[in-house]
Structure formats: C-alpha cells, structure tokens
Amino acid sequence: MQNTQGIVKRPIITEKATMASEQMNRFTFEVIQSANKIEIKNAIERMYGVKVTKVRTANFGGGKASTKYTNRGIVQEKARKWKKAIVSVAQGETIDLFNNY
C-alpha cells in the first residue's frame, strides 16, 4: 500500500465535475495510474475525513495526440497517460475542494 498523499494528485474541477458534486455527492480526482480502488478509497477517507461508498476509475491517454511537420519529417506526439477516480461519499457528507488545495 502506498502513501496516502502520493495516490491523489489533484482534484478535477470542471463544470461537469462540480455539478456531480453538488447534485449526486460525487467528487472527481486525478490519481496515480498504479492505484487501485481500495487504495483510492482509503486515501480519500484519510485526507478528507469522509465515508466513501463507491469508487469508479477510468484510464485516459497514450494515444495519438497531434502531428507536427518539422525539418526532420513528420513527428507524431502521444497524449499523456493519466487515471481519473470518481468517488461517491456517504449521504450528508461533503468535501470542500477549494479550501483543501
């Protein structure tokens, strides 16, 4: 099991994630790729002092991102790889993302 601070990289604050946190009590975080759902759950519970009921994860990136034409020819870049965790917390509990980061 890894260090709690090392698992969660940052909260993801977008319009869609903010709406999910307000309406459905779900919070979105970027986590390290090697973390599993149990480690993510334990890290969020320790960091914010809430009861996590469900964790969903998704892996992104690694595919073709863009093509550049240089004097060496055509260069294709890859998108960075990252993992997203959507965490549901117990009814009545909340995470204040703006004051903790």
Image (cartoon, helix red, strand yellow):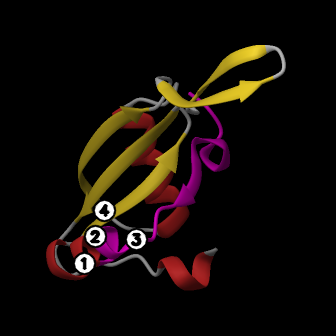
| Amino acid of disc 1 | Met
Instruction: Give yes or no for contact between labels 3 and 2 (Cβ–Cβ under 8 Å).
Output: yes
Q: Secondary structure at mark 1?
A: helix
Quick one: label 4 or label 2, which is nearer the N terminus? 2
Quick one: label 4 or label 3, which is nearer the N terminus? 3
Residue labelled with disc 3? 14
Count of marks placed on residues: 4
Q: Secondary structure at mark 4?
A: loop
Residue 16 badge: 2
- Residue at the image point whose x is 47% and y is 31% from the top: 61
- Disc number lying in front (4 or 1): 1
Q: Please tell me which residue lies in front, 12 or 80.
A: 80
How far is mark 3 from mark 1, CA to CA?
8 Å
| Amino acid of disc 4 | Lys
How far is mark 4 from mark 3, CA to CA?
23 Å
Residue 51 badge: 4
How far is mark 3 from mark 2, CA to CA?
5 Å
- Read off the magenta span: 1-18
| Amino acid of disc 2 | Lys
Residue labelled with disc 1? 19
Was residue 26 drawn as part of the magenta stretch in this picture? no
